[in-house]
Image (cartoon, rainbow, N blue to C red):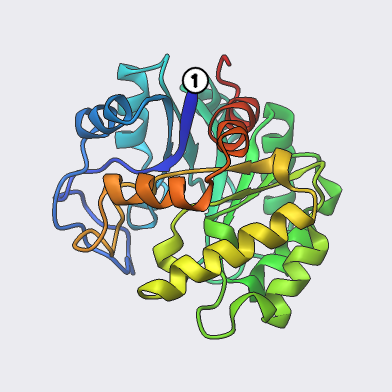
Amino acid sequence: MKQVDTHAHVFRADSPLAPGARYRPAADATPQAYLAHLDQHGFEYGVLIQPSFLACDNTQMLAAIAANPQRLKGVAVVAADSDPAALKALDQQGIVGLRLNLFGQPTPDLSGPAWRRLLAQAEALGWQIELHCPPRLAHGLMAQLRDYQAPVVLDHFGRIDPDQGVQDPDYQRVLALLDPGRHWVKVSGFYRLGQGHRGESLAQEALALLLDLGMRDHLVWGSDWPHTQFHQSMTYEAAVAFMAHLLPDAALRSQILADNACRLFGFPA
């Protein structure tokens, strides 16, 4: 069984930050340290996600993938008006998707000509579209993405509002739009859903709802290492421990960590 950690970041703490960045890293998150975590916890593969504070400068992620092409792939952040040749080059460097991280960012109009071209190019490359945004934005973006065949991946359980929980009308709209044939959800980053037991409880409630909706074949897990904004309270070991608590059934755990993830990201199973 070849397991995949589908969500992690690499960066240098001294990297130039994107304008308006909401977070400044306190320490390096090196590819070597990440691979050591994978080895320690039995993960064959990892997926690197471009962090928001580096915006469209995917250089560090691409360098990590180039040094470990058999083990790592990536999800990039790109400008809406990106040149098709540049996107093809990213594809050849191990990028398998584009990320819309909209916390603190304006909501894009995906019906605009630049976005339509970008999404069509992503679809032609076989990329996925990863949404990291609150539920109030997610359901509208999911509706705009209906015309594209690219898989749509929701980060961190769909980022449930900690105060409103899974009964939040916006989160319920997200759940109503989920199509087990093309949507995916990362059951990751539970600590981003609320402090202490609140985040753990909401993660468990959300997982139950997702399974009831027939999403078992379209759930994946990620460590969210190095736990940006939570690096003082979270560790890789703690993320793995909660995953084991969240997924006590060995068959379901194997499906999410191995079968589903290898299928979504194109790793050899």
Location of residue 200 with respect to 38 vertically, above or below? below
Image coordinates for residue 101, horizontal then vertical, percent: 50, 59
**Whether residue 208 can be seen here:** yes
**x then y, percent, for residue 109:** 69, 65
206 left or right of 17 in image: right
Q: Quadrant of the C terminus?
A: top right
Find residue 123 and report its image quarter. top right
Residue 114, how many percent across, how many down? 68, 51
Q: Is residue 245 above or below residue 150?
A: below
Residue situated furthest front in the rendering: 249
Left of 219 or right of it: where is 36?
left
Return the residue nearer the eye: 69 or 185. Answer: 185
Q: Look at mark 1 in the image and give the residue it sits on.
A: 2
Q: Give the quarter of the image for residue 140.
A: bottom right
Residue 82 appearing in the image: no
Q: Secondary structure at mark 1?
A: loop
For the point 28% across and 65% down, the residue is 23
Residue farthest along the bottom direction in this orientation: 163
